[in-house]
Amino acid sequence: MIWRALYTLALRAALPLVVLKLWWRGRREAGYRRHVAERFGEYKCASERPVIWLHAVSVGEARAALPLVRALQSAFEQHRVLVTCMTAAGRDTVKQVYGESVLVAWLPYDYPGAVRRFLEYFRPCLGLLMETEIWPNLLAACRDYAVPVVLANARMSDRSARGYARWRVLFRPAFATLAAACAQSEADAARLAALGASRVSVAGNLKFDLVPDAAQAAAGRAWRAALDRPVLLLASTREGEERMLLDALPAKAATVLVLVVPRHPQRFDEVAQLLRQGAPALGCRSRGEMPQPLQRVFLGDTLGEMAFYYAAADVAVIGGSFAPHGGQNLIEACAAGTAVVFGPSMYNFAEASRLALEAGAALQTADAAEAMRQALGLCADRPRRERMGAAGKTLCAAHRGATERHLEICRRLLSAPARD
């Protein structure tokens, strides 16, 4: 308790910086300046039905939660699903993917009063935190209000586990409050148990249950066919990666179209400026343009179209893996049947990466230059990339079922007698 009090004191001292950060980020993403009162537990989107609450911090978690949210809506029709986020892009994604079928709000900052107001307002009968979201005051309040909380699609890298372990006096009680932790792998489960979670099971990865949007995939394939040349996708790239990957692109690869899709929409303009340095007449997906025959680079500057981009690509190089960011989701590419190449930093997707490598669906390289060399080699080797694409689809089919395992735990917790 004393450590949580000190943690809360530190949060309160940081409040001016928190508000300043919201204002600053709002300069580039207006969503950060909307519904600010929700960040502190004040809401105006009540439900007349019982609420199942799911927290998806940003874009990746919001998309990964889709099969689980749909399953919850089907299994518990008398309930309303509330999806909370922390990022503007995540909230936009929820609106885009789920429409009006769910309530959407900001999760409040981890101040005791704010989380209590959140729980008192929505009165959720079950909470699900996607992947790795451990907030000491929030989980303590859920315990006090008898709200069972599940850590869903839980992953815990060695790096994250070491960080939590350094602050075990604060986080061990938080992990202990979890009603269940549905780990993606045995390794994740072992790390969660070591951190204090007592009801851990291996449920698999919800991302394997995602089915690519059929309309987007068909449009992507048609787009690729109209080009009649190989397409190399740089998918979900992070800061600095576009330059290092494009610098490794040899002049002899002029027939290959490089399609660049940055991970964060707030970087679209920045990346466009970078790409125009070598291609003044840059084509952009947001303008509905088609790449011209002599264009080498094209910008994918739209949100929520990854199924289109992966279907349009012959080979996908996964961003976030060439700088120490831990990688991005490669399962979407595998599900689309696209050959995958990624760099050395994939600790956030360690299990999926291992499975893809073992299945022959992906290649891992030591750096950006080697990644581009391998990717261009695959663009020129149709039989090999088709074998890799088929292996990716087989891998995804073999690892489906996480949604039902999560749903069974939710059924058990919702049917359990209310705790005092």
Image (cartoon, helix red, strand yellow):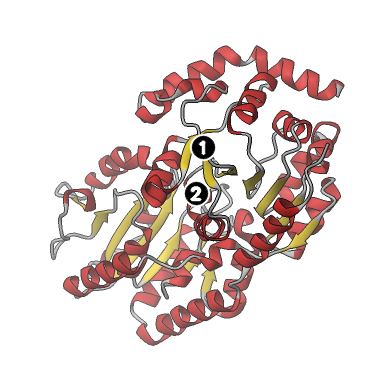
Residue 80, relative to residue 312: is it above or below? Answer: above
Which amino acid type corresponds to the residue marked 1 in the rendered image? Glu
- For image coordinates 69% across by 34% down, the residue present is 135
Crowding near pointer 1: few (<14 within 10 Å), some, many (20+)?
few
Q: Percent x, y for residue 348?
A: 61, 53
Residue 351, relative to residue 34: is it above or below? Answer: below
Residue 62 circle label? 2
- For image coordinates 43% across by 19% down, the residue present is 23
Q: Percent x, y for residue 38?
A: 51, 25
Residue 37 circle label? none
Answer whether residue 52 is visible to the viewer in this image.
Answer: yes
Which amino acid type corresponds to the residue marked 2 in the rendered image? Ala
Q: Percent x, y for residue 265?
A: 36, 42
- For image coordinates 46% across by 22% down, the residue present is 36
Choose the circle earlier in sequence order: 1 or 2. Answer: 1
Instruction: From the viewer's perspective, tell me whether residue 193 is left or right of residue 182.
Output: right
* The N terminus sits in image quarter: top right
Q: Residue furthest bottom?
A: 383
Q: Considering depth in this image, is 148 or 268 the residue closer to the camera?
A: 148
Answer whether residue 252 is visible to the viewer in this image.
Answer: no
Q: Secondary structure at mark 1?
A: loop
Q: Considering depth in this image, is 333 or 282 the residue closer to the camera?
A: 333
Q: Secondary structure at mark 2?
A: helix
Instruction: From the viewer's perspective, tell me whether residue 223 is left or right of residue 401.
Output: left
Q: Percent x, y for residue 118?
A: 60, 28
Mark 1 or 2: the one toward you:
1
Crowding near pointer 2: few (<14 within 10 Å), some, many (20+)?
many
Which residue in the structure is indicated by mark 1? Answer: 48
Residue 164, relative to residue 200: is it above or below? Answer: above
* Residue 232 in which image quadrant: bottom left
Q: Considering depth in this image, is 323 or 227 the residue closer to the camera?
A: 227
